[in-house]
Each structure stands twice: as C-alpha cells, then as structure tokens.
Amino acid sequence: MRIIVSIKQVPDTTEVRVDPETNTLIREGVESIINPFDMYAIEEAVRLKEKHGAETIVITMGPPQAESALREALALGIDKAIHITDRAFAGSDTWATSYILAQAVKKIGEYDLIICGKQASDGDTAQVGPGMAAHLDLPQIAYVKKIEEISQEKKMIVAERLVEDGFETLKAPLPCLITVVKEINEPRLPSLRGKMRAKKAEIVKWNKDAIGVEEDKIGLRGSPTQVVKIFTPPQKKGGEIWQGEPEELGARLAKELKKYL
C-alpha cells in the first residue's frame, strides 16, 4: 500500500499581510508552520503505515522555506518527501494549486490513498483536496473523522465523515482521496531518532518541467480566481442597552426594525 500526504506550510500568525500589487500573502519575515489540519493527515498516514506496512510519501508545493515542513513530516514518521517548487507557481489559486499537486501525484505513479487536511488555515477554502481528486478523476470522501476499514486486496475504503447533524459512513474504491478533520486522531510529537533521520534525509525537488504542467494553468496567469481588492472591514460599532417596560421596548424595537425594510 502506498499513501501520499499533501501538506501546506502556512504563516504562524493571524495577522497576515497582503501585497497590494499582487493581492497575495506576504510570507517573508513571518514564522511558518505545517497547516494544523495537515498534522492530522500526517498522523493518520503514519498510523496506517504502522498497521498495514504502507509506504508513505509527503508532498508540498511552496517556496524554498517549505522544505522545513517536509523535514518535520519525515521526523513524525513519513518515509519520503517531495518538494514541488518553482517561481512560476507563485500566485496560484486553489484551482491552479490542485492542478500542480495532481500533476506531481501522476509523476509519483501508483498509489492507493491520498490524505489531505480538510482546509488550510490561511485560506480556509477547503478546495485543494477535492480539486486534486477532480484533476485525478478520483473518488473522494471529505471531512473524514474515522477510517473504519481500508483494504488493498479488496481495493476499498470505508470511512465516517462529519456532516452538520452527525456523520455518514461511506464506502469508496481505491485509489481514493480523503480530507480529514481533527476528530480523526491525536498527532504525535517527533522522536529524537525521527528528528535525526529527517535532518539527514534527501528531499526530492521537482519544478514545473519535472511534473509536466501546462504554462497557462499555473501561477497568476493560470488562476481563474482573480482577487480584485483586499481590505480590512470597518470595525463594528457597539450596541445599545434598552431599559423599560416590555410594551414600550417592543414598540421601540418595531420602529427600529422598520428602518431596514
């Protein structure tokens, strides 16, 4: 069994800065971490490796500094790491990003399962995982909270996914892509042995030519989503506290509501 984990390095802050010319995040000078939801994806892959003897591969698309995220994943128990990096990828939206990652997965070759975190903390779109599945023409199960069963022999996976009023149990054929939520496990801390192995490990690097992307499908030019303007919304004014008799307050409230009709 071969499992691919797709992760993203994100800013370790809630105060993100935006380049006013490109409308993209400014990452220079900001501490970065593995996207929190991707930590659960890494942990689930390692658990499946320990249970089924699977081979695990982590991939990420990002600038040179994203290598540190891959080494952290290796320290946590992932077997191999691939860094997809090229200046031509800069400014890619979720569609272009999922296309680039899908092309990298195709280059890897055979696999049984792709695991992604449900969404990234810097974008919160939850689109890249499902987008990869669409580009790869794979079945997908989003918001997975538990893998009930997975079998390479039967070529199938059974998983529970969160929905608004509970959960659903779904069965899908392998290969398949899943996105996971925090309820699925508790991520481990890296061991000293894992850190030493990760420090010495070779990180495979692929650029746009290596994975065979089409130039008009990557970067700002290849992104169908165009950010026209980014601004901070005005601060909301504080509310009022009314006191009085119920009849009086009811009449006053009705009068105020009529202003918005």
Image (cartoon, rainbow, N blue to C red):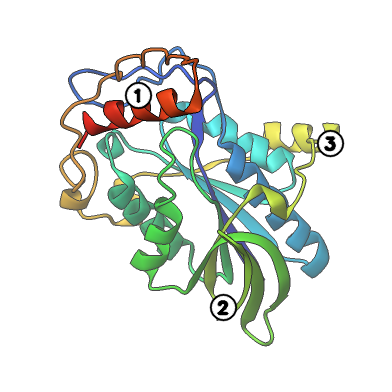
Instruction: Indicate the position of residue 55 as horizontal and vertical percent values.
Output: 68, 62
Please rate how many residues cluster around mark 3, counting C-alpha atoms within 10 Å: few if below 14, some from 14 to 19, many from 20. few
Q: Quadrant of the N terminus?
A: bottom right
Distance from label 1 to label 2 (Cα)?
62 Å
Please rate how many residues cluster around mark 1, counting C-alpha atoms within 10 Å: few if below 14, some from 14 to 19, many from 20. few
Residue sitting nearer the eye, 128 or 6? 128
Residue at horizontal 21 percent and vertical 28 percent from the top? 259
Helix, strand or loop status at disc 3? helix
- Mark 3 or 2: in front is 2
Q: Amino acid at mark 2?
A: Leu
Instruction: Indicate the position of residue 77 as horizontal and vertical percent values.
Output: 74, 47
Distance from label 3 to label 1 (Cα)?
69 Å
Which residue is disc 3 drawn over?
Answer: 193
Mark identifier at residue 174: 2
Which residue is disc 1 drawn over?
Answer: 252
Q: Amino acid at mark 1?
A: Arg
Q: Is tag 3's residue or tag 1's residue first in the polypeptide sequence? A: 3
Q: Amino acid at mark 3?
A: Arg
Helix, strand or loop status at disc 2? loop
